[in-house]
Image (cartoon, grey):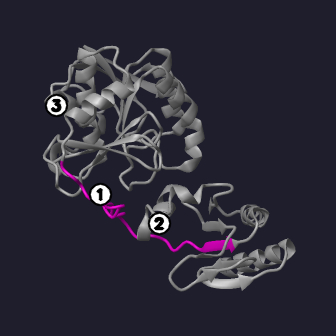
Amino acid sequence: MVKVVVIDDGVVPGFLPIPPLSSCLEISDGKVQNQVNFPTFITHGTNCASILERLDAPCEIVSLKVLDKRGRGLIGNLVTALRWCVDNGVKIIHASLGTANYYDFSSLSPVLASLCEKNTFIIAACHNTCLPAYPAAFPGVLGVESDVTGTLNRDEYVIRKDDRTSNYIFTVGVNYLYKAPSGHIYKDQHSNSFAAPVITAYVSKLLEKFPNLSLNECIILLKQTASKKIIDLPYYEKVVLHGESETIPVISICGEVTLFKDCLEIIRDSGYRVAAFSDQCEIPLAEYTNVLGDNFWKIIEKIYQPNIIAIHSKKNHTINSDLQIEENMISFNNINFQFSSAAGLKKLIDQILSKWAA
């Protein structure tokens, strides 16, 4: 029987049918320890485990809790959990979670690389907004998303290669009934979290039969049973962000990257949190453009919670259909300003910030 480590908010026995549960662990004080307190409700991880059971996955589960009851957690705890998997020779990791915060990627990359070198199979849910998110976007990880078009039947899947990350993405027909913590039963058709266990179940069946299977060999076998249906995947209007969005000022600068860095220093020294995008420093703009469409600003606000968004380009660029940004020009909330030097930029930024804060 294959061992699957479920990294989530904990798998709790007694609520739903799940595979055998060999141990329940959690991250406490930066260490992996036996879980002490158990929720009295159905957790996200328990729902994921129940899908493994429904598909007769030949596995036993190790529950490794890194998230709280709201589904939130520290990136350091996820790194610790993954490092534990490296040290203990884990074969399959199921992670219906991830981070789309670019600054978390550098923390996760080394341990994910170590797992891939050990031929560990990592199945991870893609971000529900279709942002690049780790672990799912890391090369060698099997990223999973749900079919939002309704083309696939439940548990059917197709495979494609993500041009951005070079890893394989599985699109799964979900149409799954799950129990919320309240006990209410909901029909879920769009959650990547509940699509991922389907692929984990299929991978566990293959490893039960072929214990020494490599990732590439596994992909070849999974392609043989993949659906031949064609899905027109919309990039990507499938996510509706809930709640009202604040209006965050957007600064766009065209010029040398040193000017952009000067701008960021001024903003940060003034006490503002800035989400900064550039293909030469900070968050690579290419990670997000052509993916988010009209939802770009709202999603950036949700992930990074900035006071200000800053965008840099070395060449002339357009930030909306009407506004062209040229060299040595800064745009603030769709109004253009010209500057001639770094000193002129500093003065301009100071004026903009003081006027905005007033």
**What is the number of the mark on residue 93?**
none
User: Callout 3, which amino acid?
Assistant: Leu
- Do labels 3 and 2 touch, CB within 8 Å? no
Considering only order in the chain, which callout, 3 or 1, is on the residue closer to the N terminus?
A: 3
Depth-wise, is mark 2 or mark 1 nearer the camera?
1
Give the CA separation, mark 1 to mark 3.
Answer: 33 Å
Residue placed at 35% from the left, 39% from the top?
96
- Is residue 252 highlighted in magenta? yes
- Residue 294 in picture, x, y percent from top left: 42, 71
Residue placed at 79% from the left, 80% from the top?
339
Mark 1 falls on what kind of element?
Answer: loop
Q: Is residue 152 visible?
A: yes
The part of the chain drawn in magenta is 229-253
- Give the image quarter of residue 143: top left
Depth-wise, is mark 1 or mark 3 nearer the camera?
1
**What is the number of the mark on residue 233?**
1
Give the CA separation, mark 2 to mark 1.
Answer: 18 Å
- The answer to whether residue 317 is left or right of residue 140 is right
Within 10 Å of disc 3 (Cα), the crowding (few <14, some 14-19, many 20+) is some
Q: Which residue is mark 3?
A: 16
Q: Which residue is mark 2?
A: 296
